[in-house]
Amino acid sequence: METIRIEDAKQHVGEQVRLGAWLRNKRGSNKMQFLQLRDGTAFFQGVVSKAEVGDAIFAKVKALHQESSMYLIGTIRQDDRSPFGYEMDVADVTVVGESEGYPITPKEHGTDFLMDHRHLYLRHLQPFAVLRIRNTLITATYEFFNQEGFIKLDAPFLTSSAPEGTTELFHTEYFDTDAYLSQTGQLYAEAGAMAFGRVFTFGPAFRAEKSKTRRHLAEFWMIEPEMAWMHQEESLALQERYIAYLIQAVLDCNEYELDLLGRDKELLAKYTHLPYPRISYDDAITLLQENGFDLEWGVDFGSPEETFLANHFEKPVFIVNFPKAIKAFYMKRHPNRDDVVISADLLAPEGYGEIIGGSERETDYAYLEDRIKEMGLDLDEYQWYLDLRKYGSVPHAGFGLGLERMVTWVTGEEHIREAIPFPRTMNRLRP
Ligand code: ATP
Ligand code: MG
Ligand code: MG
Ligand code: MG
């Protein structure tokens, strides 16, 4: 007999099949038991009738605890009343692994409790839906960049330098010297772009974020495309195409998961309509000031400003040309102004904040050298990077997307810790 996965049940209506599943919950009477089952692909119900299975199996089923694992044999039946649309009329049950005293009961639990039991909580409905959507975003990322002529280039995680500043660095030992956990693969991606034209890195980024916001993890995954022979406008067009592609992929592949989460699919579909608005940092400051924000030109935006701006446009919005002083040294000077760089942050609507940070890259050797010194960085560490300007420098641009920010937004979760299997935050290193 074929062993199937629950998500394929609709192809087996009327057939007797076998499946391996865990028990989430059960209810019923002395004649019928309704088993809430899951197998990692979907949640559904198995119906066990005493008359069908006999006294012995029925007694065994009635005694099962939450999260016991079992093989079930039965017939798949379409049932429009059940949330999944299909059920199994169970003919036989073989218990594989007992489970007593499972800590996450169907009652309400606090966040800390659930995060302490994250290794088990992954089995539950919300992480199931969120992390399957995360998987779609990862798969779609590879698809998209393959279609656009990129190759994936792996940047190292152990580095000797700190391009984004030193305050958020994780320090470690590397044989007899100091090393840092990588905050970004950006500089390596630039080397890759000069070798392969278009590359993207995809790996963990480590930042010792000391503030406890809903949008920052200490370890997160970043996708960093870098394109040779490309200016900012073309990069922005690529970015919005990428975001629309990701959202469409989730709409196409994860209707079930979006429904489990109660996420508004029509709203998501609106975000696939391009282009996204672009406004300058200058205009954003004016707009904020006109709307009661007390801030000066030159500051970086925090969560309230980002939320206001994106809500104002009801769409993802690019804020372009930020002040040079608050951006990384490698961003290209504006041709007509010395105080801003050719950069763009993409802000997500609904209060989800900065999703992408990107820029055109500075190509001038002497200017970069000055900027590195000005920022108080060690020039020796960047000699290899400066080589990229020395030997056949070309216009190029790139950006970084935080995967968990994207997951949080698409799934409509409140907090970024839900968007990664095992979150690392200021006060969580376990499990
Ligand atoms: P923020 O302003 O939100 O702190 P950033 O400007 O410091 O972000 P970048 O250095 O531009 O971030 O990194 C590129 C992208 O990586 C961001 O747009 C965001 O999506 C993501 N990101 C940055 N820091 C974090 C973090 N601590 N946790 C999760 N994602 C992050
Ligand atoms: Mg930051
Ligand atoms: Mg930022
Ligand atoms: Mg940024």
Image: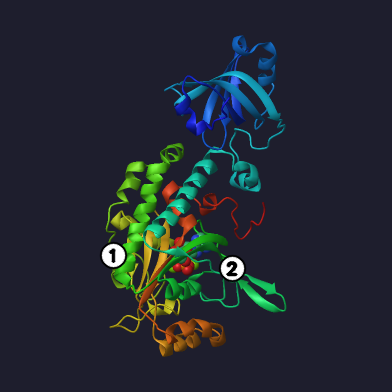
Label 1 neighbour load within 10 Å: few <14, some 14-19, many 20+: some
Residue at horizontal 70 percent and vertical 32 percent from the top: 99
Q: Is residue 422 left or right of residue 354?
A: right
Q: Who is closer to the viewer here, 284 or 251?
A: 251
Label 2 neighbour load within 10 Å: few <14, some 14-19, many 20+: some
Residue 157 bears which disc, if any?
2
| Dot 1: element | strand
Q: Give percent across and percent down for residue 119.
A: 64, 45
Q: Give percent across and percent down for residue 285.
A: 32, 70
In the rendered structure, which amino acid carries the disc numbered 2? Phe
Between disc 1 and disc 2, whose residue precedes?
Answer: 2
Q: How far is the residue under mark 1 from the one under mark 2?
A: 33 Å
Q: Is residue 153 left or right of residue 1?
A: left
Q: Is residue 300 visible?
A: yes
Q: Is residue 7 above or below residue 81?
A: below
In the rendered structure, which amino acid carries the disc numbered 1? Arg
Question: Where is ligand 4, by quadrant?
Answer: bottom left
Residue at horizontal 60 percent and vertical 32 percent from the top: 106
Residue 278 bears which disc, if any?
1
Q: Who is closer to the viewer here, 121 or 251?
A: 251
Name the mark nearer the viewer: 1 or 2.
2
Q: Who is closer to the viewer here, 352 or 295?
A: 352
Query: Mark 2 vs ligand 1: CB under 8 Å?
Result: no
Looking at the rendering, which quadrant does residue 319 occupy?
bottom left
Looking at the rendering, which quadrant does residue 317 occupy?
bottom left
Q: Is residue 203 above or below residue 391?
A: above
Q: Give percent across and percent down for residue 282.
A: 30, 73
Q: Give percent across and percent down for residue 76.
A: 50, 22
Q: Is residue 349 visible?
A: no
Residue at horizontal 45 percent and vertical 64 percent from the top: 151
- Location of the N terminus by quadrant is top right
